[in-house]
Image (cartoon, rainbow, N blue to C red):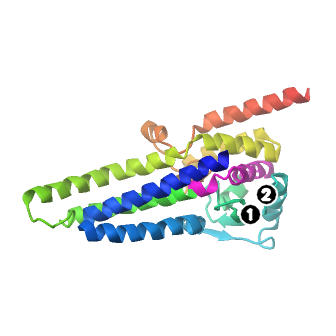
Amino acid sequence: MRGLTNTLKTTALLGALTVLLVLAGQWFGGTQGMIVAFILAVLMNGGAYWFSDKLALSMAGAREVSRYEAPHLYQMVAYLAQRANLPMPRVYLIDSAAPNAFATGRDPQHGAVAVTTGLLQLLNDDEVAAVIAHELGHIKNRDTLISTIAATFAGAIAILADMAQWALLLGGFGRHDEDTEDSGLAGVVSGLLLILVAPIAATLIQLAISRTREFEADAAGATISGSPLALASALRKIEAWKQRLPLATNPAMANLYIVNPLDGGAIVKLFSTHPPTEERIARLEQMAIRQRALVW
Protein backbone atom coordinates (compact mmCIF):
# COMPACT_ATOMS: atom_id res chain seq x y z
CA MET A 1 0.00 0.00 0.00
CA ARG A 2 2.83 2.39 0.92
CA GLY A 3 4.59 1.65 -2.38
CA LEU A 4 1.39 2.24 -4.37
CA THR A 5 0.77 5.56 -2.61
CA ASN A 6 4.28 6.77 -3.38
CA THR A 7 3.95 5.60 -7.00
CA LEU A 8 0.78 7.67 -7.39
CA LYS A 9 2.47 10.70 -5.80
CA THR A 10 5.48 10.28 -8.09
CA THR A 11 3.23 10.12 -11.16
CA ALA A 12 1.32 13.20 -10.00
CA LEU A 13 4.54 15.16 -9.42
CA LEU A 14 5.95 14.27 -12.82
CA GLY A 15 2.64 15.18 -14.46
CA ALA A 16 2.54 18.49 -12.59
CA LEU A 17 6.11 19.23 -13.63
CA THR A 18 5.16 18.64 -17.26
CA VAL A 19 2.16 20.99 -17.04
CA LEU A 20 4.18 23.66 -15.26
CA LEU A 21 6.98 23.61 -17.83
CA VAL A 22 4.55 23.65 -20.76
CA LEU A 23 2.70 26.66 -19.31
CA ALA A 24 6.00 28.43 -18.64
CA GLY A 25 7.06 27.71 -22.22
CA GLN A 26 3.84 29.22 -23.52
CA TRP A 27 4.33 32.33 -21.39
CA PHE A 28 7.89 32.77 -22.61
CA GLY A 29 7.58 31.78 -26.26
CA GLY A 30 4.00 31.12 -27.30
CA THR A 31 3.25 27.91 -29.23
CA GLN A 32 6.88 27.32 -30.18
CA GLY A 33 7.96 27.80 -26.58
CA MET A 34 5.27 25.36 -25.44
CA ILE A 35 6.57 22.65 -27.80
CA VAL A 36 10.17 23.17 -26.66
CA ALA A 37 9.03 23.09 -23.02
CA PHE A 38 7.13 19.82 -23.56
CA ILE A 39 10.23 18.17 -25.02
CA LEU A 40 12.24 19.53 -22.08
CA ALA A 41 9.62 18.19 -19.64
CA VAL A 42 9.85 14.69 -21.14
CA LEU A 43 13.63 14.77 -20.79
CA MET A 44 13.40 16.13 -17.24
CA ASN A 45 10.87 13.48 -16.20
CA GLY A 46 13.15 10.72 -17.45
CA GLY A 47 16.12 12.33 -15.79
CA ALA A 48 14.24 12.87 -12.53
CA TYR A 49 13.31 9.19 -12.35
CA TRP A 50 16.65 7.70 -13.34
CA PHE A 51 19.15 10.26 -12.14
CA SER A 52 17.53 12.31 -9.36
CA ASP A 53 19.52 10.41 -6.73
CA LYS A 54 22.81 11.25 -8.44
CA LEU A 55 21.71 14.88 -8.78
CA ALA A 56 20.79 15.09 -5.10
CA LEU A 57 24.10 13.58 -4.00
CA SER A 58 25.99 15.92 -6.31
CA MET A 59 24.10 18.98 -5.05
CA ALA A 60 24.90 17.94 -1.47
CA GLY A 61 28.61 17.60 -2.31
CA ALA A 62 28.52 13.96 -1.22
CA ARG A 63 31.37 11.60 -2.09
CA GLU A 64 31.03 7.83 -2.09
CA VAL A 65 33.25 5.94 0.36
CA SER A 66 34.25 2.28 0.41
CA ARG A 67 34.65 -0.13 3.29
CA TYR A 68 38.37 0.68 3.22
CA GLU A 69 37.97 4.47 3.35
CA ALA A 70 35.42 4.49 6.19
CA PRO A 71 35.43 0.99 7.71
CA HIS A 72 33.53 1.82 10.90
CA LEU A 73 30.75 3.71 9.10
CA TYR A 74 30.54 1.12 6.34
CA GLN A 75 30.31 -1.74 8.84
CA MET A 76 27.59 0.09 10.78
CA VAL A 77 25.51 0.65 7.64
CA ALA A 78 25.97 -2.99 6.58
CA TYR A 79 24.86 -4.29 9.99
CA LEU A 80 21.76 -2.07 10.10
CA ALA A 81 20.84 -2.87 6.48
CA GLN A 82 20.96 -6.56 7.38
CA ARG A 83 18.70 -5.93 10.40
CA ALA A 84 16.30 -4.04 8.12
CA ASN A 85 16.41 -6.86 5.53
CA LEU A 86 17.61 -4.41 2.87
CA PRO A 87 20.31 -4.63 0.19
CA MET A 88 23.52 -2.87 1.17
CA PRO A 89 23.11 0.80 0.15
CA ARG A 90 25.95 2.92 -1.18
CA VAL A 91 27.59 5.01 1.53
CA TYR A 92 28.43 8.70 1.10
CA LEU A 93 30.14 11.36 3.18
CA ILE A 94 29.42 15.09 3.06
CA ASP A 95 32.28 17.29 4.22
CA SER A 96 30.37 19.58 6.57
CA ALA A 97 30.72 20.30 10.28
CA ALA A 98 26.91 20.47 10.59
CA PRO A 99 25.42 17.14 11.71
CA ASN A 100 22.79 15.82 9.30
CA ALA A 101 22.02 12.92 6.94
CA PHE A 102 19.71 11.85 4.13
CA ALA A 103 18.89 8.84 1.98
CA THR A 104 18.11 8.64 -1.71
CA GLY A 105 17.63 6.10 -4.49
CA ARG A 106 14.72 5.12 -6.72
CA ASP A 107 14.21 1.79 -4.90
CA PRO A 108 15.85 -0.34 -2.16
CA GLN A 109 18.13 -1.95 -4.76
CA HIS A 110 19.58 1.48 -5.61
CA GLY A 111 19.59 3.00 -2.14
CA ALA A 112 22.23 5.40 -0.86
CA VAL A 113 22.85 6.87 2.59
CA ALA A 114 24.77 10.13 3.01
CA VAL A 115 25.97 11.50 6.35
CA THR A 116 27.97 14.60 7.16
CA THR A 117 31.37 14.40 8.79
CA GLY A 118 29.91 16.55 11.56
CA LEU A 119 27.37 13.85 12.35
CA LEU A 120 30.17 11.34 12.94
CA GLN A 121 32.10 13.79 15.11
CA LEU A 122 29.30 15.26 17.25
CA LEU A 123 27.14 12.17 17.89
CA ASN A 124 28.07 8.95 19.66
CA ASP A 125 27.93 5.56 17.93
CA ASP A 126 24.43 4.70 19.19
CA GLU A 127 23.08 8.02 17.94
CA VAL A 128 24.80 7.71 14.55
CA ALA A 129 23.41 4.19 14.20
CA ALA A 130 19.92 5.46 15.02
CA VAL A 131 20.20 8.21 12.38
CA ILE A 132 21.36 5.71 9.76
CA ALA A 133 18.51 3.38 10.76
CA HIS A 134 16.07 6.27 10.23
CA GLU A 135 17.44 6.76 6.72
CA LEU A 136 17.18 3.04 6.05
CA GLY A 137 13.57 3.36 7.21
CA HIS A 138 12.99 5.83 4.37
CA ILE A 139 14.53 3.35 1.93
CA LYS A 140 12.46 0.48 3.34
CA ASN A 141 9.27 2.58 3.15
CA ARG A 142 10.19 3.57 -0.43
CA ASP A 143 10.11 7.27 0.40
CA THR A 144 13.40 8.09 -1.29
CA LEU A 145 12.28 8.33 -4.92
CA ILE A 146 9.33 10.60 -4.22
CA SER A 147 11.40 12.78 -1.86
CA THR A 148 14.24 13.19 -4.35
CA ILE A 149 11.87 13.94 -7.25
CA ALA A 150 10.16 16.53 -5.04
CA ALA A 151 13.56 18.14 -4.46
CA THR A 152 14.24 18.11 -8.22
CA PHE A 153 10.79 19.59 -8.85
CA ALA A 154 11.34 22.36 -6.30
CA GLY A 155 14.67 23.16 -7.92
CA ALA A 156 13.02 23.39 -11.35
CA ILE A 157 10.41 25.80 -9.99
CA ALA A 158 13.14 27.97 -8.47
CA ILE A 159 14.91 28.12 -11.86
CA LEU A 160 11.66 29.15 -13.56
CA ALA A 161 11.19 31.92 -10.99
CA ASP A 162 14.73 33.19 -11.65
CA MET A 163 14.13 33.13 -15.40
CA ALA A 164 10.90 35.07 -14.96
CA GLN A 165 12.64 37.66 -12.79
CA TRP A 166 15.39 38.27 -15.35
CA ALA A 167 12.92 38.31 -18.23
CA LEU A 168 10.81 40.87 -16.40
CA LEU A 169 13.83 43.07 -15.65
CA LEU A 170 15.00 42.92 -19.25
CA GLY A 171 11.52 43.56 -20.60
CA GLY A 172 11.34 40.25 -22.41
CA PHE A 173 8.62 38.46 -20.48
CA GLY A 174 5.54 37.18 -22.18
CA ARG A 175 4.62 36.53 -25.77
CA HIS A 176 5.07 39.20 -28.34
CA ASP A 177 2.66 37.94 -30.97
CA GLU A 178 0.78 41.21 -30.61
CA ASP A 179 2.71 44.33 -29.78
CA THR A 180 -0.03 45.92 -27.70
CA GLU A 181 -0.19 47.54 -24.31
CA ASP A 182 -2.60 44.87 -23.07
CA SER A 183 -0.32 41.97 -24.03
CA GLY A 184 2.63 43.75 -22.43
CA LEU A 185 0.68 44.26 -19.22
CA ALA A 186 -0.42 40.62 -19.25
CA GLY A 187 3.21 39.55 -19.58
CA VAL A 188 4.24 41.68 -16.61
CA VAL A 189 1.39 40.33 -14.46
CA SER A 190 2.25 36.75 -15.47
CA GLY A 191 5.89 37.34 -14.63
CA LEU A 192 5.09 38.79 -11.22
CA LEU A 193 2.76 35.90 -10.43
CA LEU A 194 5.42 33.35 -11.34
CA ILE A 195 8.06 35.15 -9.26
CA LEU A 196 5.78 35.44 -6.22
CA VAL A 197 3.97 32.12 -6.41
CA ALA A 198 6.85 29.85 -7.44
CA PRO A 199 8.63 29.71 -4.05
CA ILE A 200 5.32 29.02 -2.27
CA ALA A 201 4.44 26.36 -4.83
CA ALA A 202 7.82 24.68 -4.35
CA THR A 203 7.28 24.50 -0.59
CA LEU A 204 3.71 23.24 -0.94
CA ILE A 205 4.88 20.53 -3.32
CA GLN A 206 7.40 19.35 -0.76
CA LEU A 207 4.73 19.49 1.95
CA ALA A 208 2.47 17.40 -0.29
CA ILE A 209 4.91 14.52 0.15
CA SER A 210 3.48 14.48 3.68
CA ARG A 211 5.38 15.22 6.83
CA THR A 212 4.03 11.98 8.29
CA ARG A 213 6.81 10.13 6.45
CA GLU A 214 9.28 11.45 9.02
CA PHE A 215 7.24 9.98 11.86
CA GLU A 216 7.08 6.67 10.02
CA ALA A 217 10.82 6.69 9.31
CA ASP A 218 11.48 7.54 12.97
CA ALA A 219 9.43 4.52 14.05
CA ALA A 220 11.12 2.30 11.48
CA GLY A 221 14.56 3.59 12.46
CA ALA A 222 13.91 3.04 16.16
CA THR A 223 12.86 -0.53 15.40
CA ILE A 224 15.86 -1.23 13.18
CA SER A 225 18.38 0.22 15.64
CA GLY A 226 16.51 -1.07 18.66
CA SER A 227 16.85 2.27 20.46
CA PRO A 228 14.13 4.95 20.21
CA LEU A 229 15.92 7.03 22.85
CA ALA A 230 19.18 7.04 20.86
CA LEU A 231 17.28 8.46 17.86
CA ALA A 232 15.52 10.99 20.10
CA SER A 233 18.90 12.08 21.49
CA ALA A 234 20.33 12.34 17.96
CA LEU A 235 17.44 14.52 16.80
CA ARG A 236 17.84 16.75 19.83
CA LYS A 237 21.56 17.24 19.15
CA ILE A 238 21.11 17.85 15.41
CA GLU A 239 18.39 20.42 16.08
CA ALA A 240 20.57 22.19 18.68
CA TRP A 241 23.66 22.23 16.46
CA LYS A 242 21.59 23.57 13.55
CA GLN A 243 21.55 26.96 15.28
CA ARG A 244 25.35 27.06 15.62
CA LEU A 245 26.45 25.16 12.52
CA PRO A 246 23.93 25.74 9.71
CA LEU A 247 24.28 23.35 6.80
CA ALA A 248 24.96 25.11 3.50
CA THR A 249 22.56 23.39 1.12
CA ASN A 250 20.14 24.12 -1.69
CA PRO A 251 16.70 24.94 -0.17
CA ALA A 252 15.12 22.54 -2.68
CA MET A 253 16.88 19.67 -0.88
CA ALA A 254 15.67 20.55 2.62
CA ASN A 255 13.00 17.85 2.62
CA LEU A 256 15.62 15.10 2.18
CA TYR A 257 17.52 15.60 5.42
CA ILE A 258 16.63 13.95 8.74
CA VAL A 259 16.26 17.44 10.27
CA ASN A 260 15.38 20.43 8.11
CA PRO A 261 18.74 22.25 7.80
CA LEU A 262 17.05 25.59 7.15
CA ASP A 263 16.00 27.85 9.99
CA GLY A 264 13.48 30.63 10.22
CA GLY A 265 10.63 32.19 12.14
CA ALA A 266 7.14 30.98 12.88
CA ILE A 267 5.92 31.32 9.28
CA VAL A 268 8.88 29.31 7.96
CA LYS A 269 8.23 26.61 10.57
CA LEU A 270 4.57 26.51 9.57
CA PHE A 271 5.61 25.62 6.01
CA SER A 272 8.50 23.37 7.08
CA THR A 273 8.94 20.12 5.18
CA HIS A 274 9.44 18.35 8.54
CA PRO A 275 7.21 18.03 11.60
CA PRO A 276 8.46 19.80 14.74
CA THR A 277 11.54 18.03 16.10
CA GLU A 278 10.11 18.30 19.63
CA GLU A 279 7.05 16.30 18.55
CA ARG A 280 9.22 13.64 16.92
CA ILE A 281 11.29 13.33 20.11
CA ALA A 282 8.14 13.04 22.24
CA ARG A 283 6.81 10.22 20.06
CA LEU A 284 10.11 8.34 20.27
CA GLU A 285 10.14 8.72 24.05
CA GLN A 286 6.61 7.33 24.20
CA MET A 287 7.72 4.45 22.00
CA ALA A 288 10.55 3.69 24.45
CA ILE A 289 8.06 3.70 27.37
CA ARG A 290 5.83 1.22 25.54
CA GLN A 291 8.80 -1.01 24.81
CA ARG A 292 9.80 -1.04 28.48
CA ALA A 293 6.20 -1.82 29.49
CA LEU A 294 6.19 -4.84 27.19
CA VAL A 295 9.46 -6.11 28.73
CA TRP A 296 8.12 -5.73 32.25
User: Relative to 105, does residue 124 appear above or below in the rendering?
Assistant: above
Disc 2 marks a residue whose amino acid type is: Leu
Span highlighted in magenta in the image: 123-147
Residue under numbered circle 1 = 89
Q: Is residue 30 left or right of residue 112?
A: left
Residue wearing tag 2: 86
Q: How many marks?
A: 2
Where, by quadrant of the figure, is residue 107 drawn? bottom right
Q: Nearer the viewer, residue 156 or 170?
A: 156
Element type where label 2 sits in the image: loop
Tell whether position 149 is magenta.
no
Q: Position of residue 128 (x, y in %)?
A: 75, 52
Callout 2–callout 1 Cβ contact below 8 Å: yes
Q: Position of residue 73 (x, y in %)?
A: 78, 62
- Magenta stretch secondary structure, dominant: helix
The vertical placement of 247 against 59, above or below, is: above
Residue at the location (34% across, 71% down)? 36
Q: Position of residue 279 (x, y in %)?
A: 62, 33
Label 2 – label 1 distance at C-alpha: 8 Å
